Amino acid sequence: MNLSLILELAKRDITEKYSGSTLGALWNFIYPLVDIFIFTVIFANLMGSRLPGSSSVYAYGFYLTSGVIAWNAFSNTVTRTSTVFLDKKYIISKVKVDLSSFPLYIAVSESITYVVTMGIFLFLLLISGYGVSRVILFVPFIYIIQQIFAYSLGFFVGVFVVFVRDLKEIVGIMFKIWFWFTPIVYLYDVLPDIVKKLMVYNPAFSFIHLYQTIFIYKEIPSLKPILYLLLLSLVILFFAGIIFKKLEKDIRDFM
Amino acid sequence: MIKVSGVSKKFKLYHTPTDRLKEKILRKKYHREITALENISFEVKEGQTLGIVGQNGAGKSTILKVLSGVMLPDDGLIEVDGKITGLLELGTGFDQELTGIENIFMNGTFLGMDKNEIERKKDDIIDFTELGDFIYDPIKTYSSGMLMRLAFSIAMHAEPKCFLVDEALSVGDAYFQQKCMRKILEFKNNGGSIIFVSHDMNAVKTICDSAILLDHGHIISSGDPKDIIDYYHGMILQKAHMGDAEVIVNEVKDRTDHKTPNVSTGEVELLSFKVLNSKDEEILHIESEQVIKVIYQVKALKELSDPHFGLHVRNNLGVSVFETNTYCIGAKTFSLKKGQIAELKWEFFFPLSAGDYSFSVGVANKGYGRDAFEEYLLMAHDIEVLKVIPNSSSIIYTGVFNMKPKVTIQEGIDSSC
């Protein structure tokens, strides 16, 4: 599997979704823009949501945005990677491709969306006067680990989705629950103590929380949780690799 | 060069996709097994073409899938020196929503070309397809022939060392098929190896250097394409007989000492076969454009209610030149009792160009429809070979036979009018 193939697939992935429409690939960025707009303007101005301990009107909107951007990149990468073998059956059953690195194009294409959305977000942070601190230099590092985790998880599930189609729907529902189990819309502080303790076992919390720390509280994040996440990702990747080796022939036969 | 050694492939059939996983986890059997390929070995050297023939389900497509890497064999080794591409089924991995040109980039990358290489070859690829402005349209608007042209062109321009061709080629029109054939031959002459899978026996005979016959995943015969195809026809005969008679495939030595397979159900026997000239002398060669006679005797070993007899003439490549039978001609035949002998006397004009021609005899029972029989009884291939030498009093020509043209030339026509 070569890089040019992954990039070519990623490029098609971004342009294809809206092919035929006049604005084309621009739609990829209009959607997140509208999201950010809703979070900041509607939530802050119309509903008057406030972040405790912050004087800025926009603080809650930005809190929400920082979590949602990271969550979207994560959840889209996992869910789309997990069904990639079924979705791209027409390629896999006709051309020789390396199945293990094939899904990487999804991670790349989601990253492009992420970078652009992040750009818009940073722009809003600056013009609103909320500002950013130098700690955002941690973001690329966090993002890379987050995507390694997303790819490993997606690939792991993807191997099984080929045989158990129901898993695709189960993954969708799991992510809905997972989203609300993670302090993205609400604050970590409002959780009861028992749930707070459980949060240690929520891998998504480990990186979402870092985004919030960096963008909203402008503090230097504790990197321990994300290093645990990296370790977890490598373990999942290792097992995914072993299972994939065992099932690769069946996957190909099954296509 | 392609070298395949001991390749086996079994398919497991499951009721539901989940059973497959259940089996892995519970270690209990949930499938039934189908052997698609068993211990397949062959080699295609540089500049050689191998034909693969066989009935539906013999394992031809599986071989191609394993060779192209889409499927993994259970066992065995495949060695290919260089890239392997091909024209397999329609639209090899094409994306229906993308335009022709986008698919060139997409498919080209799949076939291992990088962006610069595709950019460089793009115009050549498009020129070969002759798609013109259609190349800018989504390929969902293409006809199957257009898709084939695009797929073929990309696969060829990927500079493979080995090329796989299957029935997909037959989708194209005659013009484009010939264009593809020329390209394939050019590829072969430049040292490429080709594997050709087809039901078109004449094409196999014409372009293949050797052939293998597959049946239920086994190679049951390999060698000269002509022999393989004769064997294959024999198998079909056996099948047409619904297996209600045992088929004996034996080697018959004819006068030229050329071994040919002779397929019979043991219900008739070919007693004699003679080729005569107009003076009733037995001949081994004859001048073109003479009348010849073919006489053969067939003995019925069981009662035949409506027997019919055929004659088949083929050239040295094994390509059919002429074939007919008493049923198709509408000749009256008589029923035969067990032990009775029928003598067939054919007389015809032989205007074929110089070369060796072989005669084959077929016997069948109970004709129906336009040209079919309920029972096929005997197919004896290449019983006799007749050498045709040029007729010294004839015109000079090349080709298959003398069409005896009449030409008139009109002089003095003014080009201005």
Image (spheres, coloured by chain):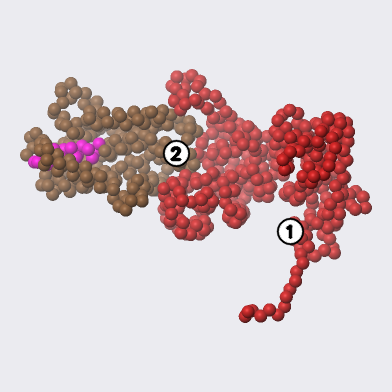
Query: Hey, which quadrant is residue A242 in on the image?
Result: top left
User: Is residue A58 one of those drawn in magenta?
Assistant: yes
Residue A112's label in the rendered image is none
The dominant secondary structure in magenta is helix
Near-viewer residue (B210 or B334): B334
Circle on res. A89: 2
The chain that appears red in the image is B
Q: Residue A98 location, x and y as percent?
A: 44, 39
Q: Which chain is brown?
A: A
Marks 1 and 2, how far apart at CA:
49 Å
Residue at 13 percent across and 28 percent down: it is A189
Q: Residue at x 44, y 38 (%)?
A: A89
| Quadrant including the C terminus of chain B | bottom right
Mark 1 touches mark 2? (CB < 8 Å): no
Q: Is residue B370 visible?
A: yes
A252 displayed left or right of A122: right
Q: Is residue B220 above or below residue B81?
A: above
Count of picture labels: 2
Q: Read off the chain for label 2.
A: A
Chain to which mark 1 belongs: B
Which residue is drawn at the image coordinates 15% and 23% (left, top)?
A192
Above-or-below relation of A149 to A134 = above
Residue span colored magenta: A56-71
Residue type for callout 2: Lys
| Residue B296: percent from left, percent from top | 86, 42
Q: Position of residue B95 (x, y in %)?
A: 44, 46
Q: Is residue B408 left or right of residue A52?
A: right
Element at label 2 = helix
Mark 1 on the same chain as mark 2: no
Q: Residue at label 1?
A: B399
